[in-house]
Image (cartoon, rainbow, N blue to C red):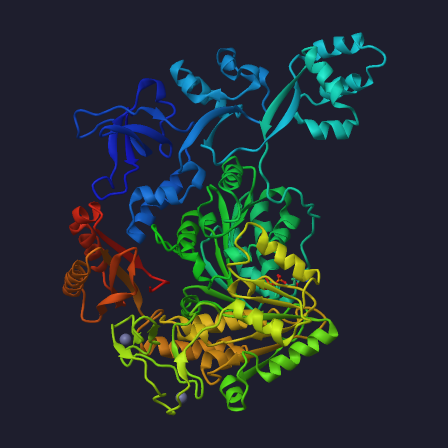
Amino acid sequence: MNIASIIVDVPAKQTDKPFDYLIPEQYKEIIVPGVRVNVPFGPRNIQGFVTGLKTESNFKKLKSIAEPLDLNPVLNPELLELGDWLTEHSLCYKISAFQAMLPAALKAKYEKKLILAPKAAFNDLPEEVRHLFAGGKEAKWEEAVEQGLIDTLKKVAARGLVEVVYQVKDRVRRKKLRHISPIVDQSVMKSQLDQLAANAKGQRVLIEYFLQHPEPVELRALLSSLSISQASVKGLVKKGILREQDLEVYRDPYEAREFQRKEALQLTSAQKDAIEPVLSSINEDRHEVFLLYGVTGSGKTEIYLQSIQKVLSKGQEAIVLVPEISLTPQMVKRFKERFGDLVAVMHSGLSAGEKYDEWRKIQRREVKVVVGARSAIFAPFENLGIIIIDEEHETSYKQEENPRYHARDVAIQRGLTHRCPVVLGSATPSLESFARAQKGVYTLLSLPERMNQQPLPKVELVDMREELRQGNRSMFSSLLFEKLQDRLEKGEQTVLFLNKRGHSSFVMCRDCGYVINCPNCDITLTYHRHKEQMKCHYCGFEDIVPAVCPECASEHIRYFGTGTQKVEEELNKLLPEARVIRMDVDTTGRKGSHEKLLNAFQEGAADILLGTQMIAKGLDFPNITLVGVLSADTMLHLPDFRSSEKTFQLLTQVSGRAGRHELPGEVVIQTYTPEHYSIELAGSQDFDRFYQQEMVARKVHKYPPFYYLSLITVSHEELMKAVSITEKITRFIASRLSQEAVILGPVASPIPRINNRYRYQCLIKYKKEPELKSALKAILDHYQQESASSTLQISMDLNPYILM
Ligand code: ADP
Ligand code: ZN
Ligand code: ZN
């Protein structure tokens, strides 16, 4: 086994395969699959992942590995295999797949150091490596390599005494605090104790403490718990009894918070029925996918918690995925209260260093539960007992860059490998998942009622066309305005929701609500301001904006959109006494500002919370009794076949913000199309009927879950090239697929030019096309040369969620 197969860090077709390298004798214990290495490649050294070992190679003149970058593998055998699956599944390069599974700190430029493990003492180290750590400092990796000590250190590391850490240059700094520990053994300390002057009380206390607890302790904690002065410590350091040392502490973002442990709740009978199949799947080590369908507040989280409890009692581990924006402190708290320090949290609000710390806790087996956003699905657990995806309908679970994976697919793949259940939870499941549950591919578990028997809030739809007819040109209907005033008088709070997606992008008649659609696709035409044109992004149809409404001949036809800032101005004008907090991308840019604004609102610092998508989730404040949706339609008319589904989900979710506690809640939804089923049914909170209707529409127009989609996007600096290549690709695809497949394109992408590159696309709808993947790969291969020279880019998205 002196040859290693290595995937090198060059994302290109020619290098997307293992290269063979000789393993130098001194590294033969360290080089195992999953370890990263430095290897000579062309004129320089680059990074690579060891994927396998062998004794023979078909190549004669093999180069040698320059050096290992890890003492222990960063990818375990399961994750290496998952990398293969990901490559196959999303048509990405192996190197991109591997890198996607690791925290960013391991991808960037880094410095490598050896450190003493937090629990290890300097004296535990074998003599021959001690000098590297002289003075309790970190050891330099290069020094260890030069002195041929790496293999020895590997053994020391195996005993848990040292670790390799990566420090991204100038970016990730491991957080360090001054620690104190004894450097002499017990007998020396005892004899010191006898020699101490009578007034050296502090030093006495210290030595007595360290006789009991010889491990390093953080200085501030030591001073306060023993009530002694720093001078006593300094005294003993001078005498050579104690040592000061800066040691790493984890940057725990929740460190300052106290979590009171909470016990499991007595389950209701509905919850018992729902959890029972999950528990048997855990008990029997059987993979099964569950769809837990229950309105907000129906007790889903309690089911997650108790399932995890079961998994932990079997000595296994759990992954919980939560959408980025719902990963609020409130959410994290519930897991920490139940499982304490066994929980690691991973989300994008953490710095690269904090993420790396959380990842290392998993690697070191210090935690058993990970709560995190999408990428937490790659948590390097080796004994998974359950994977939970909350709010499974959220599109943020799909990664929109290479590798273009959906966390749900990865979860199911890992669930198969680990023979464990996957639980998908939602109040408004995705059509795809609900259809699979209907077909019995997933097991449906329902929680039909809210825990506290609170009725769902009363929802009223306001027809904004009618408002206009009655001369109200403001963005507030008279009903919403009345209720706003009423809440102000009572001192109760209001949430105003403005859907910002779809801003100014469609054309609508303000008199009759008519929205201009594509005649071929049943998709809203997008308004293009610079040419005063409307355009279909699926088939390319174009038209000029009509001067009068084709439906009612009114002249009030115009493109649509209002921003939060404008709403705030209007509120200030109409209700000058109201205190407003605005939450949108502009006011929440800085780290922690999101939480600050929410806290301020919770503490009653404002009467009205005005915001976009980001306030749709996680708000659970007792004083909110009114929710207003300013324009329910904006998202409905996005050029996306999921627009009805997204509208329904969002309105249902926003409505759920009102009346969660004692005070009853009311919801006012303003709309120009109250008759549209997704708005009408969101009003009555009727998911089942929405599902029926939407399935009919999807079937007629050949969209998921009846058909699969693949999107090919071609971009090029020259328009003609983009067009002609997309044409060729489309023809090639058509020749390889059956008659049943539908191919839309070539057509300009909804965003036809980005960074001076023209974009064209081709959308494929299909049911079963065994040839498709190989055809797509053939295309990538064929254009590889051209793509490498960077004038051409071809992206392939199997199962796209963004069609722009
Ligand atoms: P969901 O996740 O569906 O929104 P939760 O699990 O958060 O629902 O439950 C809603 C509320 O009901 C929470 O405050 C929770 O503590 C409480 N709850 C859940 N299950 C029980 C139970 N079995 N007994 C008492 N209270 C419960
Ligand atoms: Zn009209
Ligand atoms: Zn069209």
Q: Is residue 351 above or below residue 516?
A: above
How far from the left and from the top, in percent, is residue 278? 53, 58
Camera-nearest residue between 458 and 387:
458
- Residue 172: x and y in percent read 49, 36
Q: Position of residue 331 (x, y in %)?
A: 60, 55
Report the residue at 53% width, 68% height from top: 564
Answer left or right for 386 relative to 39: right
Question: In this figure, what is the number of numbered marks?
Answer: 0
Q: Residue at x 42, y 32 (%)?
A: 110
Image position of 488 (left or right of 477): right
Front-most of residues 742 and 593: 593
**Which quadrant is home to the N terminus?**
top left
Name which residue lies at 56% across and 64% down: 615
- Figure quarter occupied by ligand 1: bottom right
Q: Position of residue 495 (x, y in %)?
A: 61, 69
Q: Residue at x 37, y 26 (%)?
A: 68
From the viewer's perspective, is residue 2 above or below residue 354? above
Q: Nearer the viewer, residue 2 or 357?
A: 357
Q: Taking 328 as reference, is 654 above or below it? A: below
In the image, taking residue 549 as reference, residue 453 lies left or right, namely right
Nearest the viewer among 291 and 330 is: 330
Asked whether the viewer can see residue 216, the reply is no
